[in-house]
Amino acid sequence: MGMTPCVLCWYQRIAMFPIALVLGMSLYAEDRRGAVYALPMALTGLVIAGYHSLLVAGLVPQAWIPCSAGVSCANQKLSIFWGLELPWLSFASFAAIAALLFVYLRGTRHDL
């Protein structure tokens, strides 16, 4: 789309891409430990996406913006799905992944 991601968008991608690899490999190997390894990445991404979402909503002071050069983290122009901006969608995806991993780990606790 020709848009450069901001710093917080990069951090969210850094948290998301390994989740896909770890869960994909653990699914292939039928290894429960992949969920254990992916959960901290999902929670880290959830915190970053939550902060980014609050920043876009204007609920975080402008002095706390980590983007000093380049694309602004607070000024998101791209919105999809009936006006939802990308940080909110990222937050929702990290929350869904974390919740599903919690449910999975809770259901397979006896396999430790």
Image (spheres, grey):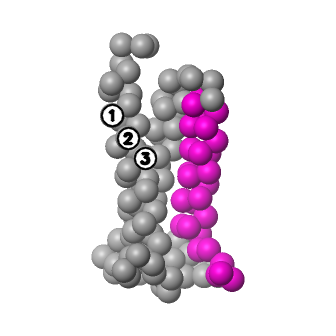
User: Residue beneath label 1, please?
Assistant: 103
- Give above or below for 58 relative to 35: below
Q: Which residues are magenta?
A: 1-27
Residue 65: in sight, yes or no?
no
Would you identify the image quadrant in which residue 93 lies?
A: bottom left
Question: CB under 8 Å between callouts 2 and 3?
Answer: yes
Mark number, residue 97: 3
* Residue type marked 1: Val
Main SS of the magenta part reads helix
User: Are the residues at dot 1 and dot 2 in contact (C-beta closer than 8 Å)?
Assistant: yes
Residue 25, labelled with which disc? none
* Pointer 2 residue: 100
Q: Position of residue 20 (x, y in %)?
A: 59, 45
Amino acid carrying mark 3 in the image: Ile
Residue 92 higher or lower than 83, as above or below: above
How far apart, in angstroms, are the residues tagged by discs 2 and 3?
5 Å
The quadrant of the rendering that contains the C terminus is top left
Question: Which kind of residue does numbered mark 2 sit on?
Answer: Leu
Q: Is residue 22 magenta?
A: yes
